[in-house]
Each structure stands twice: as structure tokens, then as C-alpha cells.
Amino acid sequence: MPSHVPSAVFYDQRQQGVDTHPPVHVRALIEDGRVFSEIFPVRFDEVGPDKACTMRTVASMMQECACNHIQAMWGKGQSSPAEMRRNNQAFVCTQMHIEVHEYPRWGDEVEVKTWVEVERSVSARRDFELVLCDGPEGTCRAVGAATSRWVAFDVAKRRMVRIPKKTTEDVTNFHALLDNYIMGEDYVMPKLPDIKASALPLSQPKAFTGDRLDLDMNGHVNNVVYTEWILESVPVEMWGDYQLCELDIEFKSECGYGDVVAAVTAREGSAEGVVIEEDNARVIHQLVKLGEDGRETEVIRARSTWRRKGAMTAEEKEMAAVIAAAWGKNKGGKAKGRLGGIDPGSVDAALLAR
């Protein structure tokens, strides 16, 4: 198999008449077998009018990478170790936090890395990093990250159980990347609010039905589909003014074929409904399964964080403050060096000084 060539380098070389191998789909265990890496092309049907992929695509890449890592650990077609399968147990995801700093575009190739650690007898942590290599000569940068919480579940009794001791030992000794926290060692998954218990004005419910193509191999609606349902309920004007940069999800229960689910959203703010932060907005979400008897079952709680398009990031704001302070010192005379002629009050000041 030819070695991997980032797509940006491949297309540039082809235009220059260089005979090189096309990009290939690569999977590999790295870091002494404790990290799983997989490279995904951004496909035509995964992008919108701006040619950038979506949060759903990011979630799908991470899910696929995690499932292939599991097969590398426990065998082709296996989603759990033998000792758990014998006891009709499986791992299920209860929480996930995703951050996207930059959305890859059509034609890009994204390397997704994932690793796992059993932290307690009842739960494990799986982290992810998304890397894009499209710079000169294939230089790379991180464009996203995620962390997730997993528990062992008794499929027959429908309840959480302790992770088997042998599973914990095998993962720790042979597969886990220990003490490597993508969000930092002190990061704690946020507890998400019940949207219906809040005083915030709710959106009109948007209804979805679990269709055949939405189901995973367990007969439940795939977690990636929930991501799509959550975001489809966001008002269209939000997409015009803001870009989605973070998503927190709590998985409460599952849905199956034919289940009807209502999605509602509310934009977080003060009691008067004023947005908390000028350049950032947060939206809370809930998916509720509607029973034939009129009863409602909570399926998902979520929170999405959005940044106003064109707004500076926290890092850029800090940089702009440094520039403004330096400019102020030269206010009485001619500004020197890189700051000369730059108005520190403009957004461009921070960007030009980079």
C-alpha cells in the first residue's frame, strides 16, 4: 500500500505534473498501540453551500473511528470483550463534549485520533483529537477535540453494572493511554438543565420519526442521528449569524423504529431574555419521545455553544488588548515597530499582529 499523501499536497503535485499516489484511507494503531488513528476524506454529500462539513459529520467520523478502535482491541465485528458478551453486557455512551475550532472542507482529509482509559469501576473515558493536514508540504493543525463518558450496561436487566475486572485490567495494561486528557485533567462534564423546568421561551417543537435508515445494528436510533435532530431544531437565523463551536450531550434513553420524537430549543440568557455574552450564545436542547398513551420520555439533553461570525476568539481578544496597551504607551509620539499605523480599536489589529 502506498504511504499516505495529504490531499492538499497530492492536488498541488498533480498540477505541477508530479506523478504521485492519490490519497488513501488509512487506519493504524500508534503510540505503542494505545492510540487509534484513522484518516477520513470530507465527502461531497457531507458539506453545505459553504463547502464546509457539519457537526454531524464530525460526530460521524469520531463514532466510526471509535468503533474501529474497538474492533482492533476485541476483534472484527465485536463491540465488547468476550467476558462482557458472555454476560450480555455492553458499553454505552452517557455523555459527550465536542469542540470544533475549524470545520474541514470538501476535499480535505481529517485524521481522527482516539484513545481510552478506564477511570473507575463503573465508567471509562474516551477522548478524540481531529487533525487537518492541508498546509504547505502537508503541515498539520488540530481543528477539533472531544471527550466522552462510557458505562457498562446489562442489556437484559436494563441497568448499569460494574466494568468487569478482567476488562479493566486488559484495557489498562494493553490498550489505554493513561493520564492523557484532551480537555485537561480538571475538566468536568457539565450538568445540563431540564429545558422544560427553565423559564426560557421555548421554540416550536419539531417532530422526527425513527426511520429504518436511522437505526444502528442494535435496532436503536444512532447517536449521530440525535446530533442531527438536535441541530435541525435550531432557528434558521441562528445559523446565519453564528457558527457552532461546541456541543454537549447527555444520553438519557434510546429510540427505535417508528418512535416519534419532539425536539425543542431555548436560547440561554438572563431572566429578561438578554443574551449573556455579546459574541457567544448558548442554546439548550431536549429530545422527548412521545408515547401512544401521551406519556413523554426524555431521550437527550444538550447544549450548543455558538460564536458570532467574524467575532474574535478569546485568544485574539487577549492579543488585541496587548496591542492596545502597547499602542497606548506610544500615544504621545510615533508608534514604533509592528504597531505603527495600526488602529488597536479594529478587529484587524489583532489579526495583522499575528
Image (cartoon, rainbow, N blue to C red):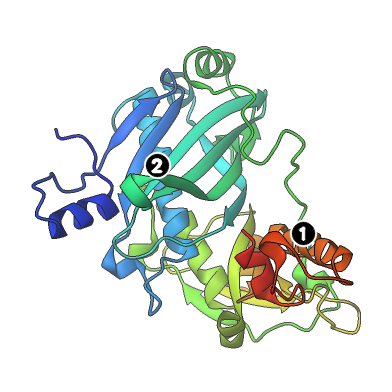
- Measured from the top left, where is residue 241 in percent x and y? 61, 83
Q: Nearer the viewer, mark 2 or mark 1?
A: 1
- Residue visible at 78% across and 76% down in the picture: 278
Q: Residues within 10 Å of mark 2 (few under 14, many from 20)?
A: many
- Residue visible at 78% across and 84% down in the picture: 201
Name the amino acid, label 2. Answer: Cys
Instruction: Kindly tell me whether residue 79 is visible in this rendering.
Output: no
Considering the image in quadrants, where does the N terminus appear?
A: top left
- Residue visible at 83% across and 76% down in the picture: 269
Q: How many marks?
A: 2
The dot on residue 318 is 1
Considering the image in quadrants, where does the C terminus appear?
A: bottom right
Q: Secondary structure at mark 1?
A: helix
Q: Which residue is mark 2?
A: 65
Figure quadrant of residue 177 = top right
Name the amino acid, label 1. Answer: Glu
In terms of sequence position, does the residue under pointer 2 or pointer 1 come before the other?
2
